[in-house]
Amino acid sequence: MATIATPVEIEGDVLIPLSAMDAVMNTYRVVVLYIYPPPSSEASAFNLDKLQRSFVTLVNEDYPVLVGELHVHGKTISVKQTPVSRHQASSSKRDYRRQRIHFSGWGMAIGVDCSHVLFDGEAMLTFMKVWGQHYSKVRKNARLVVNHDRYLLSGTGETPRLSHPEFLIAPLEPLVRRKDGSLAPKTVTTPPKTDQHVFHFSSSSMAKLKKLAEGVEAEKTRHIRRKRERFLAKLLSIFSSKDKKIAQAPSPPYVSTLDAITALFTVLISQARGHGRSVRVSTAVNGRNRLQPPLPENYSGNAVFHAISTYTNEMLQAAINAVLLPRVARGVRASILERDNAFMRDTIAFISSQSDPVTINDNVHFFFGPVR
């Protein structure tokens, strides 16, 4: 396992390497608001000074990757630590920005904003858990052990063999850095104003939605579908080779609640926008336990892979019923199941083979246009 902390007395700069999967997240930020309820009557109230001190020890003892600045050199990306940055990190006088928000009953909110290069969603959750352990003064040998072996997703020099349309290489127009640190095409540095709507799903409504997305096929329909799947599978096997990965024809055996919600919003948003185009959905897939062997527990870096599913405009304009929702939901699930160990390893090889990791971006279109 990588060394947890860099001693302050070391002279010169120190580079902490990041992985290829970290580099490809350079256009995104992780922005999360954590809201904590008031402590019980027997517990002490939240102490913001103690919270700040615990953050300093958290960084010094468990997250050296947060000390320094991002550094890109050729095909590698790392965090560059200078003697000055290490000295600042070791001092409780380091300048931290914080905002106190008072809730009725003395609850607490913590806002986190960092480059996606540093963490993905699960890594951020681990970070917050370890911070909580520092705040609660949990003994070091009883705290979570954070794994910083990011070289595990840095590639081994192998040549990629598969197609990766989920990525776009060499932006067609210059990227500029926004004030929040994210990258965007120069023409869309200021996104247009949009309306925000909050949707709430209760446990019962999600259960009903999942049941609808699972669908209940009639025997005749099931027979026709399976016959078609066998024909497509046979046809695909004729054209498949060791150098090409083709999506498998059989329908997935199940859909998750999240698949159902993704399907619902894919249909609703497409119908609301009325753009008249086919839609490609990119679903983030956590590769930690899908890789073989799985990544170590509490891996601190990015392990996000992209599953792509495509739907025609004609399909999405149909009424939402027991036929449409299952089709879209199963399309989402099928794309996720295709992201097996072989595909994810090839993804790492593909990213690692690029001459400049900063030019790799997700080939995804948002409301303001493609992210390049």
Image (tube, rainbow, N blue to C red):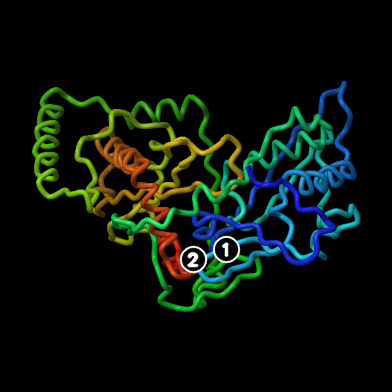
Query: Which corner quadrant holds the N terminus?
Result: top right
Disc 2 packing (10 Å; few <14; some 14–19; many ≥20): many
Q: Is 77 positioned to the left or the right of 254 in the image?
A: right
Considering the image in quadrants, where does the C terminus appear?
bottom left
Q: Nearer the viewer, residue 293 or 51?
A: 293
Q: Is residue 141 above or below residue 21?
A: above
Q: Relative to 316, is 197 on the left or the right?
A: right
Name the image quarter holding residue 29.
Answer: bottom right
Q: What residue lies at 53% left-to-right and 68% top-to-bottom?
A: 192
Contact check, label 2 and label 1, Cβ < 8 Å: yes
Q: Amino acid at mark 1?
A: Ile
Q: Position of residue 205 (x, y in %)?
A: 46, 28
Q: Which mark is residue 357?
A: 2
| Residue at disc 2, secondary structure | helix
**Residue 30 image offset from top left, x and y in percent:** 61, 53
On residue 77, the disc is: 1
